[in-house]
Image (tube, rainbow, N blue to C red):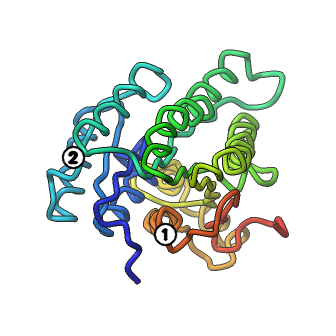
Amino acid sequence: MDLGLAGKVAIVTGGSKGLGLAAAHALVAEGARVAICGRTPATLAQAAQALGARGGRPNDVLAVTADVSSEGDLKRLVDETVSRLGGVDVLVNNVGLGKGGGLMDTPDDVWQQAFDQTLFPAIRASRLVVPHMQRAGGGVILLIASIWGRESGGRMTYNAVKAAEISLGKALAQQLAPSGIRVNSIAPGSILFEGGSWHQRQQADPDGIAKFLARELPFGRFGRADEVGDVVAFLASSRASWISGACITVDGCQSRSNI
């Protein structure tokens, strides 16, 4: 299936590893021109090289060192993308963070960090790209949330910011539909990739993780990052033209919600 993404310009925040990198790979494979950002120059450069090799079009990949919690860095990311790649058709808000524990042992600064690193970057990046999309007659904004934004599970701070992202996606979809801009969120379940939290836990406690898989994931395995990336590419495409305001689970039937 041709997704019609050839020549489209996409920004993927946190695109140097994990789900962001998988999303960028899927978009590049469909012919999109992709800008990624990350905080570590070496990791970012390695990711950009791999993306350029994947599509055979290194000039269609832009890597920008940026901290998405910084308004200035986000503006620079969007400005450089527009200047060098010619616009913004797709935004993938991928960065997420949630530390802390229970109510009594999670101080305000940890809560603030979770919102500063997850929700506010999505708000600000969306605000920055919308005028460009409006001038182009439309666009797509995606938010990488989590099944733990849809139901209980995971850390309390992570639940809160991911639920907020899903709610934000619905509100933006309704607001931006008259401008031809579609907005959706994606809720991955437990995804394994090298260096990620599940990979680290598996290395530290293989027996415990094996029991977790048997108990919690009906298919008996973790999801793969590329399985999320492929959903990103589909939702970014015109093949998903009547999908907006939705939250799509990509979890191998891990979650328990009926909706």
- Find residue 105 and report its horizontal and vertical position in percent: 77, 22
Of the pair 240 and 186, the residue shown nearer to us: 240
114 above or below 216?
above
Crowdedness of circle 2 by 10 Å Cα count: few (<14), some, many (20+)?
Answer: some
- Find residue 242 and report its horizontal and vertical position in percent: 63, 69
Decide which of tag 2 and tag 1 comes sooner along the chain: 2
**Residue denoted by label 2:** 46
In this image, 67 relative to 251: left or right?
left
- Find residue 253 and report its horizontal and vertical position in percent: 70, 73
The label number, if any, that marks residue 208 in the structure image = none
Residue at image position (46%, 21%) is: 70
Q: Amino acid at mark 2?
A: Gln
Of the pair 115 and 201, the residue shown nearer to us: 115
Crowdedness of circle 1 by 10 Å Cα count: few (<14), some, many (20+)?
Answer: some
Give the image quarter of residue 215: bottom right
43 above or below 181?
above
SS category of the residue bearing label 2: helix
Residue at image position (52%, 54%) is: 140
